[in-house]
Image (cartoon, rainbow, N blue to C red):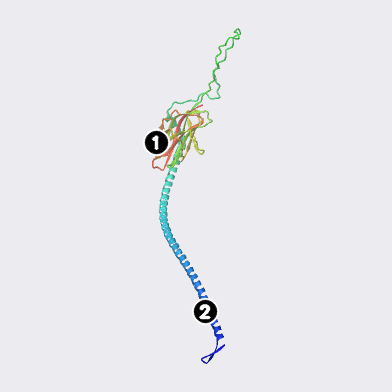
Amino acid sequence: MDYNINGSEVNLSEIEDDKNKWEDQIRKREDQIGNREDQISKWDDHINKRDDQISKRDDHINKRDEHTNKREDQISKWDEHINKREDHTDKREHQISKSEDHLNKWEDYINNMNKTYEENKEGLKMQWMEGFNTKEMEAKNSWNEPVNQPINQPKKQPINQPMNQPINQPMNQPIKQPVNQYDYIATSNMISFMREGAGAVILSNPENSNTKIFIEKTIYHNFSDAILSLEVFHNVETPEDAMSSDHYAPKDLSNYPQEPFGKVLSHENLAYHKDYCFLSSTINPYQSVDESMLKGMVLTPGTNLAYVFHIVNQQPQTVISVTFHWTEIT
């Protein structure tokens, strides 16, 4: 339907259509605004979450900074410790260098002593034998000599004696075996050891010797500035790498080169740990000590005596040897 308004024709249906279109546009716009507000709300939530994450991240960064500062302090302390250790290492190397020089001097001294000993071996043996001044034991009958000893035979029964009469017959006496006795003088190898260790000399009677060893005299020799402690043990376990000495001579030189059954062993930088020692003593620098307490002690087959030496003052090293006089009876 058309109307005339102010001289203009107006179509109401068109107006209604325009109104409806505008209302649709308004509703769409309102929907868009609502959707936009929802998006804004979601973005606000997202921003809040990001703010929380940033806050946590800041806290974590602060903690990491504190940990880094502590770590830097530790590194600084370790650097100081390393510098001190380097200074200590330099001083230690200097001390080691001095010790090596000292050891080289001692090695030269020991080599000179060994050379002197080898050059004067025979003269030293004669001096040792004269110095012991003990009763000489000569070798008696050897094993392969015949035994001229009568054996008691039973008396023959007289022919006219009754069979039931007892016969006075003496018991057969046991045959006495011949006895061999030999005196020996021997000295151990010269051994050198450090203050941290120990030196040991062992007088050993092997298990298969069938011989008793009677100790007559023992002399300890200290060739250094060190003060030594001595401990004597019995029946110790002999080290496999112990050195055996061949510096020996019979007291009766007519029996030379009769070898002794007894063995003089030595070991450097060795520490013995036994239940107890039955004899202890001290030896001053550059002294020889004549030990009389062990005179008469008997070593049966399979037994030994160990003489263990330690340095008790501040000297770094020492050189020792031990001289023995013993009697072997088989």
Residue 81 in sight:
yes
Residue with the mark numbered 1 = 282
Element at badge 1? Answer: strand
First in sequence, mark 1 or 2: give its number. 2
Residue 271 in the image: state x and y as whole percent: 46, 39
Q: Residue furthest bottom?
A: 7
Pick whichever, 8 or 61, lies toward us.
8
Residue 149 in the image: state x and y as whole percent: 54, 18
Label 1: how many residues lie within 10 Å, few (<14), some (14-19) or many (20+)? some
Relative to residue 266, is residue 36 depicted above or below? below
Mark drawn on residue 211: none
Element at badge 2? Answer: helix
Residue with the mark numbered 2 = 26
Pick whichever, 327 or 4, lies toward us.
4
Label 2: how many residues lie within 10 Å, few (<14), some (14-19) or many (20+)? few
Relative to residue 223, is residue 254 depicted above or below? above
Residue 184 in the image: state x and y as whole percent: 47, 30
Relative to residue 212, is residue 77 depicted above or below? below
Residue 161 in the image: state x and y as whole percent: 59, 8
Q: Residue furthest top?
A: 160
Q: Quadrant of the N terminus?
A: bottom right
Q: Which image quarter: residue 120?
A: top left
Residue 257 in sight:
no
Q: Amino acid at mark 2?
A: Ile
Pick whichever, 128 or 97, lies toward us.
97
Are the residues tagged 1 and 2 within 8 Å (C-beta)?
no
Pick whichever, 172 or 122, lies toward us.
172
Residue drawn 53% across the image and 77% down it? 27
Q: Amino acid at mark 1?
A: Thr
Q: Which circle, 1 or 2, is nearer the viewer?
A: 2
